[in-house]
Image (cartoon, rainbow, N blue to C red):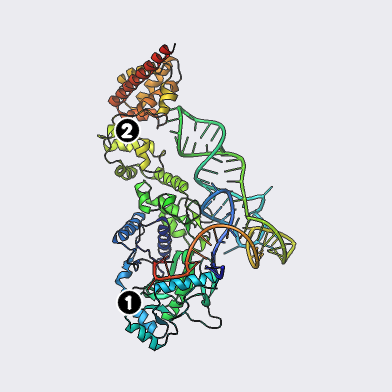
Amino acid sequence: MVRVRFAPSPTGYLHIGGARTALFNWLYARSKGGKFILRIEDTDVKRSTPEAVEAILEGLKWLGLDWDEGPYFQSGRLEIYRRYARQLLETGHAYYCYCTPEELEEKRAKMISDDDQAAGYDGTCRQLPQAGRDRLRSLGLKPSVRFKVPRGISRVTKMEDILRGPREFDNHLLGDFIILRPDGTPTYNFAVVVDDGEMGITHVIRGDDHISNTPRQILLFETLGFELPSFAHLPMIWGSDRTRLSKRHGATSVIAYREEGYLPEAMVNYLALLGWATSDSQQIFTREELVSKFSLERISKNPAIFDSEKLNWMNGEYIRSTDLEKLVDLALPYLKEVKGPAAQADREWFVELLRIYRERIKTLKQLLEQADFFFTDRIQLTEDALNKVLMKEGVPDILRQTKDVLAKVEPFNVETIEDALRALAAELGIGAGKVIHPLRASLTGRRASPGLFEVIALLGRPITLTRIEQTIQELDHRLGHSSRKWEMGN
RNA sequence: GGCGCCAUCGUCUAGAGGCCCAGGACAGGUGGUUCUCAGCCAUCAGACCGGGGUUCGAAUCCCCGUGGCGCUACCA
């Protein structure tokens, strides 16, 4: 039975990298009929917060990565780690260390400046005689517990990575590392092994920044008598400058993407493609396809740069293929507190709105931006619309005529509006564009919008007529103003 | 400094010795559809880090460089 885990430390929200790690674990569990376990690694009391725990759970839920066990909290398992540490102490695989952080820092600095081979712990307390230990203890010093890394003539630790094959590490490069702090809390390498061992984890799937930790952990697995899990170290996700993804690369919180109007399915699909691909280069996968086609062996080894452009494209794909009714449900939460024509609109109206916008938006939030003229009482004409379209000879006149025509159209729907306006253009002996473009500008304030006739129908007659009138007045004002200037200039 | 990981178009990748003068997707260019934008369709441009080997033959195997990243914590 496959048992995998996602083990974040709650020091912040669920970020993109963590989400991808969680996803790959989840996919592997689901594809193998195994269990996906959630474990919160909160042994660093100073940096862990309950808010972060909530944020991580929220992110996982949003992505639909449901867990079968947990969340387990390492902070609630301290007795277990202490028990194992005691066991190691008793069997001579660990020892108390009385070195202070200051001393260690000093030694480390010296070793680095001396160009020494390794900068690990020098083993001062390893050979400390019992008498010395007793003396230090009697002084009231609280020791940490260090693991005694097995050394010998040629002690190497062998590991096998599913993605990278067999590897060997020389134990001599590993210093005796701390497994229990003086306050009794375990350090990462120790807690991980105890938990993975106790929880029967069969596959450790995590970021490749943990590769260097793996030899230490293997040593611990072995001396603790646990069965060794398989390891799969995933490539990191980078920002565009090829460094670890961080805030300055833009949003890195999964929840921020929800707020921006990305669909969880798109996010999952995109994340799956960061470091994983099928041989046929398929891009769009349903969740079921992802589960059935996923395999650890097909994960690539090199780091992937997070490309929000491709995410945008993919989100657009998902928006376009989502059932219209469902899309309305998804979009409505982003349209809270709107004014203007949308304020009193019924559901049918919103269905129409989404129908004409679904292929134009990449995120649900973009609806708010692109369709802003539906959500306001008084539109603002953009400079672009004004200069390139409206401030042209004959425009006020054409607008007056379209207003007359639209005032009379009966019934007021897309077909009748289109027929009437095209008829008007024909009657005036001008191209339909000469009517359409100024009208669009005056109704939306913009030069680009969905099909004008659909827009007019959605706006409704009263608002359409009002906006045309407002534009005419604005133009009269502007043109009048500029012509006076012109006269004065002459 | 030591140790480790990685290295194909701008980006994500396919490629597991001949199928590759390297395929797909995003982004970009051009053209078409059209009332604009988007979408859609067509089309173009664009990469095997460098050097040595191995082999009849290497993007694929080996070595050495170079570069990037990671670890080297009483952070995970």
Q: Quadrant of residue A90?
A: bottom left
Q: Are marks 1 and 2 on the same chain?
A: yes
Judged from the image, the secondary structure of the residue bearing numbered disc 1 is: helix
> x%, y% of residue A186?
36, 73
Using residue A263 as the reference point, say whether residue A275 is left or right of it. right
Q: Is residue A192 above or below residue A367?
A: below
Q: CA distance from mark 1 to mark 2?
A: 60 Å
In the image, A201 versus A471, the foreground residue is A471
Element assignment for label 2: helix
Q: On screen, A43 above or below A465?
A: below
Are the residues flagged by discs 1 and 2 in contact, CB closer than 8 Å?
no
Can you tell which mark lies on residue A80? 1
Q: Tag 2: residue type?
A: Phe
* Crowd rating for badge 2 (residues with CA inside 10 Å; few <14, some 14–19, many 20+): many
Foreground mark, 1 or 2, reads 1
Q: Is residue A417 visible?
A: yes
Side of A414 where A208 appears, left or right? right
Q: Which mark is residue A23?
A: none
Residue A395 % position (x, y) = 40, 18
Q: Relative to A119, is A21 above or below?
A: above
Amino acid type of the residue that numbered disc 1 sits on in the rendered structure: Ile
Residue B44 in the image: state x and y as whole percent: 61, 40
Q: Quadrant of the N terminus of chain A?
A: bottom left
The residue indicated by pointer 2 is A374
Residue closest to the eye, A189 or A233? A189
**Image-quadrant location for residue A140:** bottom left
* Protein chain holding label 2: A
**Chain letter of disc 1 in the image:** A
| Quadrant where the image shows the C terminus of chain A | top left
